[in-house]
Image: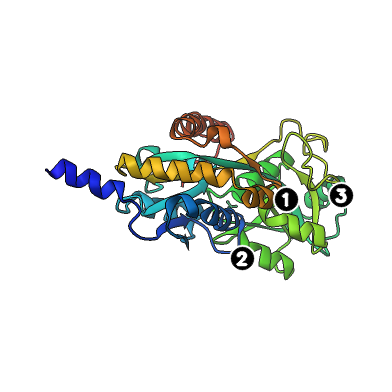
Amino acid sequence: AALVAGSAVAAEYPTRPVNMVVPFSAGGPTDTVARSLAEAMRPTLGETVVVENKGGAGGTIGVSHVARSKPDGHTILLMHIGFSTAQSLYKDPGYTSESFDPIGLVLDVPMTIIARSDFPANNITELVEYLKANKDKVSLANAGIGAASHLCGTMFMNALGIELLTIPYKGTGPAMNDLLGKQVDVMCDQTTNTTQHIKAGTVKAYAVTSKQRVPTLPDLPTMQESGFDGFEVGIWHGLWAPKGTPKPALEKLQAALQAGLADKAFQERMSGLGANLLPDRANPEALAAHVNQQVPQWAELFKKAGIQPQ
Ligand code: MLT
């Protein structure tokens, strides 16, 4: 009887709005994806998806919050590559891959290297020269250790052999506000946050981190073209539920994710911001396999680069 009652409850899922936790500030790139995805998943779920921003410590505060949340399908997590990198950047990030049931991969976003609109350098060559000559005067914004902006910024500084003063925020939403306000100098951030500002000319942009140029930002060279051999980083995003979420809820969430990725408005909004949707990998097996490949890969890379866990 208990089993029957249990599956009856699960079959009714969701019984109330679903919380989608974004482990960064509102107004940033993850939040932008989350708000569109929440809307696109709603028809399948038959309930509203409410985005909850829980920023801090490069995303690990929000991710570990979801790891500890009730596994009933009413709390889910949208996170990116930092889900895997933070596991070797922190001694104790407050979660492991095993703290979650994967739902699926969502999309992949290129990054852009940008600066405040009045920054002296006008192209990537000038930027490299300027940074090398003025490394003690330039500030680099990021969203904390474990964030995509931290990863890309670290790769960039390592490639140049310099160390800039880094200013951590709870997300690149507020970091972008300070860049627009000229309180900070440079940043590496996802096209989902930078495209509108690059097009408006309110920031300067130098390069994209994808293998190919980004169709929506055709004038920006790739890092590879700019002389940074092998400098390629894509910010994949995934959707997770806390470990132990009932199977019917996971299945409904996966169906909602797939319907969301097939939604025309979502597709147009995301491709307009330079993101590539991953409908073929929007399933638990693909996300689990990807994470299992990414965690040791980044651990190895950080070890080689001499980056110690905090
Ligand atoms: C954000 O949503 O604020 C970003 O994804 C932060 C980052 O990872 O750089």
Helix, strand or loop for disc 1: helix
The residue tagged 2 is 174
Q: Amino acid at mark 3?
A: Asn
- 122 with respect to 174 (left or right): right
Q: Tell me which corner region of the image, top left, top right, bottom left or bottom right, holds residue 116.
A: bottom right
Helix, strand or loop for disc 3: loop
- Sequence order check: which comes first, mark 1 or mark 3? 3
Residue 272 numbered tag: 1
Within 10 angstroms of label 1, few (less than 14), some, or many (20 or more) residues? some
- Sequence order check: which comes first, mark 2 or mark 3? 3
Query: Can residue 280 be seen?
Result: yes
Q: Amino acid at mark 2?
A: Pro
Q: Residue at x 35, y 37 (%)?
A: 98
Q: Tell me which corner region of the image, top left, top right, bottom left or bottom right, holds residue 102.
A: top left
Q: Amino acid at mark 1?
A: Gly
List x then y, in percent, for residue 107: 59, 42
Q: Quadrant of ligand 1?
A: bottom right
Within 10 angstroms of label 2, few (less than 14), some, or many (20 or more) residues? many
Q: Nearer the viewer, residue 122 or 63?
A: 63
Per the model, the C-alpha gap separating discs 2 and 1 is 22 Å
Q: Residue at x 67, y 56 (%)?
A: 193
Above or below, 247 relative to 39: above
- Sequence order check: which comes first, mark 2 or mark 1? 2
Per the model, the C-alpha gap separating discs 2 and 3 is 25 Å
Which numbered mark, 1 or 3, is in the foreground of this view? 1
